[in-house]
Amino acid sequence: EVQLVESGGVVVQPGGSLRLSCAASGFTFDDYAMHWVRQAPGKGLEWVSLISWDGGSTYYADSVKGRFTISRDNSKNSLYLQMNSLRAEDTALYYCAKGRDPVAGTELDYWGQGTLVTVSS
Amino acid sequence: AIQLTQSPSSLSASVGDRVTITCRASQGISSALAWYQQKPGKAPKLLIYDASSLESGVPSRFSGSGSGTDFTLTISSLQPEDFATYYCQQFNSYPQTFGQGTKLEIK
């Protein structure tokens, strides 16, 4: 059974930093690209970032480019999102999601339950 | 970035109704479109990929069609468990984007 479990969400002050983690199991982690998607309270889904199977390719939404960094550790079956210079508008539930291709963007066939990041003073 | 516009934004319907939701892309995306269902407090669930392929385990009352810029999600006969919010997503180019969502409510 595929499982994606996010962690690391907390309350952080504007301008602060945070690292989210996603522990994956039930599939061959290094065969697939992985994504982060977020959802602000009461709002729709926003795609955040993608990393290829080997970490060699990364892509970002314009809203987070230059502030967020996606990474992965295939030896630990783990995905990460380093979030710097956080703003109030980054407040959201952050989902880790599995793609279906090693490199390219595709549909997202498995999702975690999310971890909540709140940016507030 | 490619914008996806869903219509309607909300919809009231009854059990047994046939429902269609539309997703329009701001530029052509071939068939690189997926549809998701999200219930309150839950993660999104993949329903349709490549515009018209039914995800394994998803009931056959769900179907998708379209290519280029215009896409539809159809539910042939609404069931009580189908009342949820639906999103389209394009993966033709980066950044990937989602539509704003369509909330399907019970009439």
Image (spheres, coloured by chain):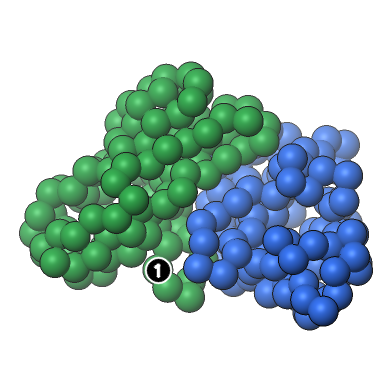
Chain colours: A blue, B green
Viewer-proximal residue among B54 and A91: A91
* Residue at image point 31% right, 38% down: B22
Which corner quadrant holds the C terminus of chain A? bottom right
Residue B20 point in image, percent of width and height: 22, 43
> Is residue A34 toward the left or the right of residue A108 in the image?
right
Q: Residue at x 73, y 35 (%)?
A: A103
In percent of the image, x 50 and y 68: which residue is there? A42
> Callout 1, which amino acid?
Lys
In the image, residue B49 above or below residue A37 = above
Q: Position of residue B48 (x, y in %)?
A: 39, 43
- Count of number-bearing discs: 1
Query: Which residue corresponds to the image point at 24% horizontal and 65% vertical from the top-left?
Result: B105
Residue identified by numbered label 1: B39
Q: Position of residue A109 (x, y in %)?
A: 53, 52
The relative height of residue B74 versus residue A113 in the rendered view (above or below) is above
Q: If the image is split into quadrants, where does the N terminus of chain A sit? A: bottom right
Looking at this rendering, what residue extends furthest in the left direction?
B16
